[in-house]
Image (cartoon, helix red, strand yellow):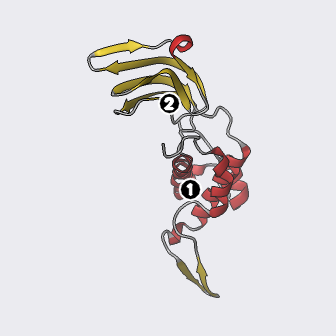
Amino acid sequence: MAIELVSYANLKALLDLESALITDYPALNIIRPSVTSAIEEYLDRSLEPIERTETIYIGSFKTSMLRLPAIPITSIASVTVTIGEDSETYDEHDEYEITEYGLKLLVSLSNAKVVVVYTGGMAVVPGAISRAALLQTAYEFQSKDHIGADNVSTEGGSVSRPAIGLLKEVRRMLDKFKHPLMGA
């Protein structure tokens, strides 16, 4: 089950929908999880708090920083480092520490493969992210008949619409939740 950034109850109230089930609105049932994906992409983070496995390849430049997408990290099951044919499992207290961006190894590595099994993500969705998801989902649902249109003709004239993507206000609300190493 994916994380729910916006409840159907809130969408129902905002959009003045009548049915008790989101499945009675097929477009909304598709748009809501796609907005969650768009928000995760924008934040460069995975929000659902589940166990996951990340494989990180470190090239020729030495680094001790391991960027993990599901932050904050709640637990580490294992960290396995492979260099050439040799593999080693790291112990938290001796060889790495949890940081705001992922893990910091206490040694620098190059030409290595690191497999991290961990649990991370948001146990509680901040109100600003929920509001952003509500606004974006409502906007996309109300505009579903005009996807990709820059201008829409109506009986009273025409309306200019923003390009496909997250609304400017939604991006503003989300900016403070971006991954600290975004783009790294």
Residue 147 image position (x, y, % from top left): 49, 68
Residue that appears at 39% across and 19% down: 81
**In terms of image quadrants, where is residue 11?**
bottom right
Nearer-the-camera pick, 35 or 47 = 47
| Foreground label between 2 and 1 | 2
Nearer-the-camera pick, 22 or 143 = 143
Q: Is residue 80 left or right of residue 126?
A: left
* Residue at the spot of label 1: 28
Labels 2 & 1 near each other (Cβ < 8 A): no
Residue 170 image position (x, y, % from top left): 65, 57
Residue that appears at 46% across and 14% down: 90
Q: Which element is circle 2 on? A: strand
Residue that appears at 53% across and 11% down: 94
Q: In the rendered image of this protein, does residue 134 appear above or below residue 96?
A: below
Q: Give the amino acid at mark 2.
A: Met
Q: Badge 2 local density, few (<14 within 10 Å), some, or many (20+)?
A: some
Residue 172 image position (x, y, % from top left): 67, 57
Nearer-the-camera pick, 183 or 28 = 183
Which one is earlier in the sequence, the residue at label 2 or at label 1? Answer: 1
Residue 5 image position (x, y, % from top left): 63, 44
Q: Badge 1 local density, few (<14 within 10 Å), some, or many (20+)?
A: many
Q: In the rendered image of this protein, does residue 162 appear above or below residue 38?
A: below
**In terms of image quadrants, where is residue 101?**
top right
Nearer-the-camera pick, 181 or 52 = 181
Residue that appears at 65% across and 50% down: 174
Give the Cα separation between the discs numbered 2 and 1.
Answer: 40 Å
Checking the image for residue 65, the label placed there is: 2
Q: Give the amino acid at mark 1.
A: Leu
Q: Which element is circle 1 on? A: helix
